[in-house]
Amino acid sequence: MRDYIEVHDLLVRTVIGVSEWERRDRQDVLINLRLYTDTRPAGESDEIEKALNYRTVTKRVIALAESSRFFLVEALAEAIARLCIQEFGVPKVRVRVEKPGALRFARSVSVTIERKREDYR
């Protein structure tokens, strides 16, 4: 699959981390998605019904992230990948979850995963 839709720096606030204050206070997390999909039907028809509706996808990702309480960014990334594949039928997804301020001398820390439909059978 050569086509994909990218969502850059989707900002959500969620409980994530292992320390006491991280379990208590919501933190900013940036989510980046690469949703592999065949864009030809939408491109040829110019009909939203034939497109992967990235607005709908991002609304679900936001709802998932904001209601979650993961300890690890890896677990949040995995849950987002699973949602994109199982709920929206994308054959492949790349998810990057970035946690700004996680390390004192770094702007942020991130985890990037790629999953395919076969990974969730």
Image (cartoon, rainbow, N blue to C red):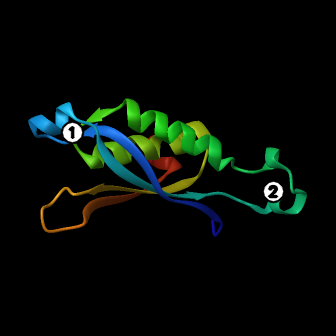
* Residue found 62% across the figure and 63% down from its top: 4
Q: Quadrant of residue 76?
A: top left
User: Circle 1: is it few (<14), some (14-19), or many (20+) Cα within 10 Å?
Assistant: some
Residue at the extreme right of the image, as rendered: 45
Vertical comparison of 28 with 68: above or below: below
Amino acid bearing label 2? Ala
SS of the residue at dot 2?
A: helix
User: Which numbered tag is attached to residue 71?
Assistant: 1
- Label 2 neighbourhood size at 10 Å, few (<14), some (14-19), many (20+)? some
Q: Percent position (x, y) of residue 118?
A: 49, 48
Q: What residue is drawn where x is 10% and y is 35%?
A: 20
Label 1 sits on what residue type? Phe
Asked whether the viewer can see residue 9, the reply is: yes
On screen, residue 121 above or below 33:
above
Question: First in sequence: mark 2 or mark 1?
Answer: 2
Horizontal arrangement in the rendering, residue 44 relative to residue 7 (left or right):
right
Seen at 17% across and 39% down, the residue is 22
Task: Give percent across and percent down for residue 57.
Answer: 59, 43
Front-lying residue, 121 or 41: 41
- Tag 2 near tag 1, CB within 8 Å: no
Give the percent coordinates (x, y) of residue 17: 19, 42
Question: Would residue 26 be found to the left or right of residue 42 on screen?
Answer: left
Comparing 101 with 89, the one in front is 101
Residue 121 is at least partly visible in this image: no
> Which residue is disc 2 drawn over?
42
Q: Is residue 9 above or below residue 107?
A: above
Which residue appears at 63% of the width and 49% of the height? 54
Q: Secondary structure at mark 1?
A: loop
